[in-house]
Image (cartoon, grey):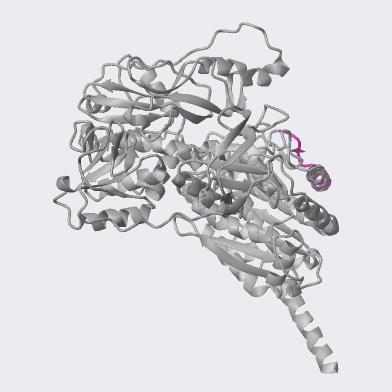
Amino acid sequence: MKKAVFLFISILSFLGFAQDTLQTPDAFLGYPLGSQFTRHHQVIDYVEYLAEKSPYAQTKSYGKTYEGRTLQLVYLSAPENLAQLESLRKDHLRSIGYETGERETTQEFSVVWLSYNVHGNESTSTEAALKTLHTLVTEKQEWLKNLIVILDPCINPDGRDRYVNWYNQVKSTPFDTSPTANEHFEEWPGGRYNHYYYDLNRDWAWLSQKESQQRLPQYLAWMPQIHVDFHEQGVDSPYYFAPAVEPYHEVLTDFQREFQVTIGKNHARYFDQEGWLYFTDEVFDLLYPGYGDTYPMLNGGIGMTYEQGGSGRAGLGIINGVGDVLSLKDRIAHHYISGLSTVEVAFNNVSRLNQEFKRYHAQQKGKHAHYVLSGNKDKLNGLKDLLAQHEIPVTTLAQETKIKGLDYNTQKTKTLAYPSGAMVVNGNGKKSRLIQALFEPTTSYSDSLTYDITSWSLPYAHGLNAIATNQNLSTQAFKEKEPQQQLDPNAYAYAAERSSLTDGKFLAGLIKAGLRVYYNTVPLTNSGKRWERGSVFVLRGENRQAENLTETIAQIAQKTGQEVTAIRSGFSDQGPDLGSNSMQFITNRTIGILKSDQATPAAYGELWHFFEQQLHYPLKQLSDDRLSERFLKDLDVLIIPSGYYRTLLDKEGNNALMQWIQKGGRVVAIGNALRTFANHDAFSLTQKTGEDDDAKVAYGDQEREAIRSSIYGSIYNASIDNTHPLAAGYDKNYFSLKTRATAYALLEGNGTVAHLPRNAKPIAGFSGDKAIALQSESLLVGTENYGRGSVVYFVDNPLYRNFWENGKLWLVNALFM
């Protein structure tokens, strides 16, 4: 017995010694934190060192970025907790009904998750994370007895290293604090974004990026009660912490609001002691579900954004607007204190956090009992896959059912028949609040002054018919898509629909494989099936050069998930035969994208990601200083992302780009890129202007007056000429997400492909009254010829944040039709 006690004391003595001798970040890195920026590999090295030396820390790699950098979590807790970490995790989920079985432990604890550096050039937070880690395992061990702190030191390593490497290359020695110094002006695209220039803090709900897709399973495996997202803002802004400002999403609870105040008051106590400036309850709201604060709130936690002044402009130090030097060391100190204060509040409120977390998840009744969806199978499968990542199950109707509820297409209560097999999402049950937020036809908000978009409903985004109902329904398990039947090697042709991105991927695969592909310009019936305009046909007789044609098509179909039909004969049952002039050849297109520092980085990145990670079709990146005949002659299509371009076209039409269009080139212009063409006399595109309003506005009312001319992500119902090749695969209506109020007049002739009708109003989301007036009879998608070439106009972004799935086929059509 004495030996056992002695051994136990010896272990404790050893542990205490280990903590005392654990190297600080300064000692390990060889420089004081704040004297230079730490590269990501150094961050990982210190995290691994700390986990190896301290019994209060464990690490877990949860993936790699697009550029191959490690994504890493650190688990901080008492050694006895880390020894049974998996059992504690399961018990935590059992407490809210997310795991079955008997409890395996008796420990009462709460989970805190701290996320740093989601925006790469907001680089202070990762530096603060290292200091926070060391302090928690050496000085705050008492807190770790009934807490599990999960710390992600850098959510966006690619963006961080882009910024850090740039800054180290351009900064002066010693660093220059003058606001006009070169080191305070990042080069395009800046370090904010990930590899594909995506804003990862808008991606929690849509999971378009590799980093988000790998992080969310880890988050859902723990379901923390508190989550903090550390950020930076302008150099002249004081520190911001919770509580957030209105609007809050309506499903959030009184406790979630109140506890933000509790945490904020604790921060204020420390900031007051230091005389640091801060603000709360302004600017940053909790409405949009893609944020790193709102998404945790919708999962029952306390989600918060902390904002330190600085961002990519501040570097190691900058003189701010009042003449003070804002140093990296000062910025680290602020994030360090707010992080520790958060953990402290959690430690002092474990029982309350657990009680309220259980209460949140016990309330499983949503606004609607069911959301029923029907439409294209590929679109349904795409939505199912997204929901699966959020651990939201789906079922299907067991038989055709007449359902009374709110019809998404009309925003009216109707009774409609939905077919057997229609998708059903249960609005009453686990994650009911998250489901309501993602599926609600319209978003309720207490204030129209918001930080982001105000509508995002998934049925509209995925182009599906939907109804929200409280009716009891008979459902069954979701049936996976049946595998493709073996294709007849002797078929006259092979055909596929074109009404989803899956179909677009298949088409791109066929073209990339060098096959000759046709589409029908009018509907036809052949081999027992009606083929709508734009369907894809590969004729055996036109592909004699292809070896193993049937096998090649089958492989592409399997890879893209496409259903292919073998066509028995070129003689159609109805409509044109397959040798008719109504069948148009789709040429192999070489596609380029304009890369310019005048482009919006996110707009450029969405297109880059779309080609490489979704369409899997070659894309040539062409910088604006190479817009010459030498480089343009190899392109068939040039995409111009949304941006503000000053010298793209010349007035005389003599520059290389205009001459290339005249000779047969096609430009696809998106968003603000349209202004370049609207301002040029050679093109008929015309920007609409609103009526002048001479009414005087009080100084204090200017912000609210401005939003009368703004659109914060509203959904509009557009009318489509679906006989036009650009509209292949679409019905006569299309729900578009508008994120700006800029409007253009309808094009003459058949150039208008999609438009907003007279007196159009948003069916969801906020649009100011002046902005609404501009949208009446305005262009959405159009095209006009210039010489032998053409320009395709997309007023709205068809790829917006990669979650507006139903817009992606527009872009495929613009490329290949």
Q: Quadrant of residue 325?
A: top right
Please tell me in which quadrant of the rendered image residue 129 appears. bottom right
Q: Give the left or right position of residue 593, taking residue 455 as reference.
A: left
Quadrant into which the C terminus falls:
top left
Q: Is residue 612 above or below residue 320?
A: below
Residue 639 seen from this side = yes
Q: Is residue 235 above or below residue 355?
A: above
At horizontal 53% and vertical 22% (from top left) the residue drawn is 741
Magenta part of the protein: which range?
267-282
Between residue 192 and residue 392, name the one nearer to us: 392
The answer to which quarter of the image holds residue 76 is bottom right
* Residue 285: percent from left, percent from top: 69, 36
Work out which residue is located at the far top of the displayed protein and give it: 694
Q: Position of residue 186 (x, y in %)?
A: 49, 40
775 is within the stretch colored magenta? no
State whether residue 204 appears in this view.
no
- The x and y percentages for residue 516 are 20, 44
- Marks counted in the figure total 0
Where does the N terminus fall, quadrant-wise?
Answer: bottom right
Residue 271 in the magenta stretch? The answer is yes
Image location (x, y in percent) of residue 209: 50, 50
Give the residue drawn at x 50%, y 30%: 736
Q: Is residue 139 left or right of residue 311?
A: right
- Nearest the eye: 570 or 625: 570
Q: Is residue 152 above or below residue 406?
A: below
Q: Residue at x 61, y 62 (%)?
A: 73
Which of these two is toward me, 369 or 686? 369
